Amino acid sequence: MKRISIGALAAVLAISLAGCEGMGPKQQTGTAIGGILGGIGGAQIGRGHGRTAAIIAGTLLGALIGSEIGRAIDTTDELKAQRALEYNRDHEPARWHNPNTGADVVVIPERTYQTASGTYCREYQMEVIVGGKRQQAYGTACRQPDGSWKIIN
């Protein structure tokens, strides 16, 4: 039997889940990112023969959580998140309520750094509460030449 790398398994599962019909691009992105991160998390906690099951379970759970976050975010949230990444100091939260989606959102830039190529990046934490359900995501965004911030993981 061929061995499949953990990252490849998580990526394949997450990408196939993200292709679900009826999802918008933000929801697809959330599903893919959540699935990959969940699969990696499952690999960290799984041992022996149960490791593959932990990867699959982590991927599915991460994809579900990421999908919900992606579905609840609209253009207003994107603009406010961009503003938080641009102007907030590390560990300074930006909070808002989106009346269009009913989401309460918190974005906290955690760490700012410059890559070897000179690009500025920020690690961040995002929390979205919709209908009493709290979802958290962690990632990294880097400043693009046009001044916008692009999520890289």
Image: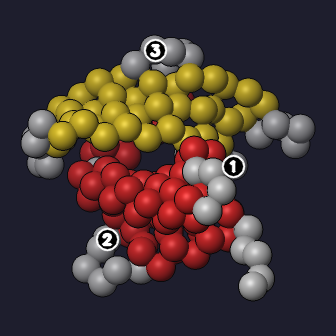
Q: Are marks 2 and 1 in contact (CB under 8 Å)?
A: no
Q: Tell me where residue 9 appears, x and y as whole percent.
A: 62, 71
Which residue lies at the image location 78% right of the left edge and 31% below the top edge? 114
Separation of marks 1 and 3 at Cα, in angstroms: 24 Å
- Specify whether 121 is left or right of 133: right
Rendered position, 59 above or below 138: below
Q: Residues within 10 Å of mark 2 (few under 14, many from 20)?
A: some
Rendered position, 11 above or below 148: below
Q: Nearer the viewer, mark 2 or mark 1?
A: 2
As shown in the figure, which amino acid type bears the numbered disc 3? Glu
Which residue lies at the image location 68% right of the left edge and 70% below the top edge? 8
Which residue lies at the image location 12% right of the left edge and 36% below the top edge? 132
Residue beneath disc 1: 145
Q: Tell me where residue 1 appears, x and y as whole percent.
A: 75, 85
As shown in the figure, which amino acid type bears the numbered disc 2? Gly
Which residue lies at the image location 33% right of the left edge and 28% below the top edge? 106
- Residue 148's image quarter? top right
Q: Tell me where residue 30 appears, x and y as whole percent.
A: 41, 58
Q: Is residue 67 visible?
A: yes
As shown in the figure, which amino acid type bears the numbered disc 1? Pro
Residue beneath disc 2: 24
Query: Which badge, 3 or 2, is on the more N-terminal residue?
Result: 2
- Specify whether 31 is left or right of 4: left
Residue beneath disc 3: 92
Q: Residues within 10 Å of mark 3 (few under 14, many from 20)?
A: few
Of residues 11 and 76, the one drawn nearer to the viewer in this rendering: 11
Q: Nearer the viewer, mark 1 or mark 3?
A: 3
Query: Which badge, 1 or 3, is on the more N-terminal residue?
Result: 3
